[in-house]
Image (cartoon, helix red, strand yellow):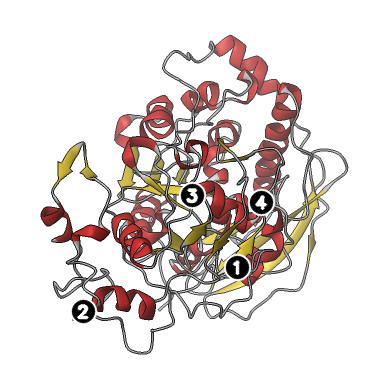
Amino acid sequence: MVYVPATAGLGFNVVGLPLAPPAEPYFIDRYEVTNKEFKRFVDAGGYQRKDLWKHPFLRGGRSLSWEEAVREFRDSTGRPGPSTWEAGTYPQGQEDFPVGGVSWYEAAAYADFAGKSLPTLAHWCWAADFKAAPYIIPLSNFGGKGPVRVGQYQGVSPPGAYDMAGNVKEWVWNEGREGARFIPGGAWGSPSYQFTMPEALPPFDRAPTNGFRCARYGAPLPEALTRSFVNTVHDYSQDKPVSDEVFEAYRRLYAYEPAELKAVVEPADDGSPYWRREKITVNAAYGGERLPVFLFLPKSTAAPYQVVVFLAGAGAMGRSSAGVLADTSRIDFIVRSGRAVAYPVFKTLYERPAPPAQNELQLRQLMVWRAQDLNRTIDYLETRPDIDRSRIAYSGVSYGAWVAPVLVAMEPRVKAVVLTEGGLSGRALPPDASAVNFAPRVKVPVLMLNGRYDYTFPLEQLQKPLFRLLGTPDKDKRHVVYDTAHDVGVFRTEMVRETLDFLDKYLGPVRMLQ
């Protein structure tokens, strides 16, 4: 374990949750609990020892007996153990991989067996030290195809804990909305921003991405650290869209001069077997700035190409676009399907940061810049003979899905929209930048892909209200909800199928080269 000093400082905020900093020093596991370590628990009869299972088993408002609950904690062959195991043990050669496929209850029972505790959300976040995220994330297991040996990646928190970002998600003590338990850190296939945006899942969830590490305290913890947390979000039930006359005034705020682009195209990167990548810079619509656009052109179809303009999630903030672009797992299959993808560096992403908005005027200005970046990207795409200007779609992930209603309402050339992991804002926005007033003006087909247990964009409070607000005819909008938290990438096959079927339907199928 590693030592984590305490602090007398102020509290901190994570995904809208006010957390008290630990007032006493503590220890936290240097690595995630491994398969080999969890096997000791299994071999010692951990699943048969009722004394280790100290917490009420609750699911859907119903209480389960210990006997009922432990019958569900079986591996792929029906033996006691994690869902990822077979015949009562872990895959060969993976003794030092983090254990995955465990529920919150199994993690808590193991922690008691080991003489430790699950860390509280505050203790976990304090040890992770999100201020160091820009240095930790690039050295962590994100964008991988599975977990790896603990400590293999060099992403280490300031106190010395490895893999708090990526590899597997990690159950912590605290309860969230509707009995869910927090599980921060993100997993190997999660968007990298999940490191600093904890999720919450039902405590019975046993996805392969679910792991944990333990903590040890020197004294009983105060209720301020162990209590349940529910982030409050804006109540949209009473919000009404403005009239067409008022909205027309808002529209004028987003207008821009379609001036000369002065496009500069850099030499193409032809290294992928599936696409050729170009980087283009054009004049932005404001401030004398230049707007970079990465254009992925498929090798499997002939021009002119259908094109999807993509806006990434928050993982694209505070880093350089010179490395691996964020959220490429959400667009690679689109290019491989035969469509082009335009990936602009919108204002606030990568090397185009903006100071945090301090008032309504600044909030609106940021939204105007984003909308104009979409406009200018499509201005450029229309100059290219290898792009089919009549078949342009928009795709946004998380952050990119959240801002989409405003951007798409201000861009009539977009013919279809895919929103992944998005919803309405958790706080009220100024009316000239709020989806409440823009979503009803979105009339094109929309596909929404979300997680049922999303803590950033809760289903009932922020997802469903957005879906209802969209002005798209009911027959042309679809909301798919997966049994997961914010990251729907864990259902990649289903996500890919839904997205491609939607694009085929509303942009038309592509013809592959023979």
Number of residues whose C-alpha sits closer than 10 Å to that of mark 2, classed few (under 14), some (14–19) or many (20 or more) = many
Foreground: disc 2 or disc 1: 1
Q: Nearer the viewer, mark 4 or mark 3?
A: 4
CA–CA distance between discs 4 and 3?
14 Å
**Tag 2 and tag 1, C-beta contact below 8 Å:** no
Q: CA distance from mark 1 to mark 4?
A: 13 Å
Residue type at mark 1: give it.
Answer: Val
Q: Position of residue 1 (x, y in %)?
A: 55, 70
Nearest to the observer: residue 315 or residue 186? 186
Determine the secondary structure under disc 4.
loop
Q: Circle 2 — which element? A: loop
Furthest-right residue in this view: 288
How many marks can you see? 4
Neighbour tally class for label 1: few under 14, some 14-19, many 20 plus, Cα within 10 Å: some
- Which mark is in front, 3 or 2? 3
Q: Is residue 129 left or right of residue 353?
A: left
The image quarter in which residue 139 lies:
bottom right
For residue 88, which numbered disc appears in the image? Answer: 2
Percent across and percent down for residue 36 are 37, 81
Kindly identify which residue carries mark 3: 120
Toward the bottom, the furthest residue is 93
State left or right for residue 508 relative to residue 330. left
- The image's mark for residue 2 is 1
**Quadrant in which the C terminus is drawn:** bottom left
Secondary structure beneath label 1? strand
